[in-house]
């Protein structure tokens, strides 16, 4: 399974919001700067997240983005499904088999690819945005507050 930049950057946006948008909205330009991703591209990635309700936006000079739910209630799988669609591993079809006869491809599909996809889904659904944000905070120490004058 290979994820597109849209899926990878979408996860980075969500985790960035979990870390930095706890008490206030976060501008897309600040996410862009921290994550070193083009603001124009982030706008394309955040749009489907907003439409799916995973992110909320607030318009205006003091506006920005925040998570649509608690980070502990949003799974990595939800984010990836919104941005990547169905990310099943392999689907093999065999049009050359005799009627009533199972093909080797069907057996491989059932015993390998379908089980692999099930395990991938179970895994990404078991990891939350909060899990990853907590790991980041643990690895980097608690985020230090910045004061602007």
Image (spheres, grey):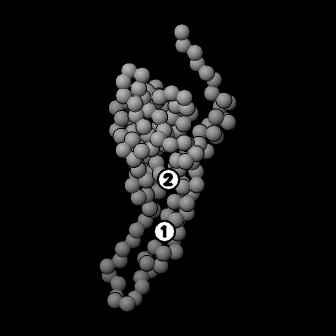
**Residue 30: which numbered mark, if any?**
none
The residue shown at (43%, 65%) is: 90
Residue 148 in which image quadrant: top right
With respect to residue 104, does 33 lie above or below? above
Q: Nearer the viewer, residue 38 or 103?
A: 38
Q: Which label lies toward us, 2 or 1? A: 2
Is residue 131 at all visible to an observer of this figure?
yes
With respect to residue 145, does 50 lie above or below? below
With respect to residue 49, does 123 lie above or below? below
The residue shown at (52%, 75%) is: 111
The residue shown at (34%, 32%) is: 40
Q: Residue furthest top?
A: 149
Q: Nearer the viewer, residue 107 or 9?
A: 9
**Residue 113: which numbered mark, if any?**
1
- Compared across the picture, whether 86 is left or right of 139 comes to left
Q: Distance between the residues labelled 2 and 1?
A: 18 Å
10 Å neighbourhood of mark 2: few (<14), some, or many (≥20)?
many
Residue 116, percent across and down? 52, 65
In the picture of the structure, the residue carrying the numbered disc 2 is 77
């Amino acid at each position: 399974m290979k994820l597109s930049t849209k899926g990878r950057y979408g996860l980075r946006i969500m985790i960035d919001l979990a870390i930095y948008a706890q008490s206030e909205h976060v501008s897309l330009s600040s996410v862009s700067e921290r994550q070193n991703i083009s603001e124009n591209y982030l706008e394309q990635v955040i749009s489907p997240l907003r439409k799916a309700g995973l992110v909320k936006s607030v318009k205006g000079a003091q506006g920005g983005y925040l998570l649509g739910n608690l980070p502990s209630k949003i799974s990595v799988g939800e984010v990836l499904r919104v941005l990547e669609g169905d990310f099943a591993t392999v689907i093999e079809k065999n049009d050359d088999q005799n009627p009533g006869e199972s093909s080797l491809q069907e057996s491989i599909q059932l015993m390998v690819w379908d089980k692999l996809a099930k395990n991938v889904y179970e895994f990404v659904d078991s990891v939350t945005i909060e899990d990853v944000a907590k790991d980041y905070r643990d690895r980097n120490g608690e985020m230090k507050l910045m004061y602007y004058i």
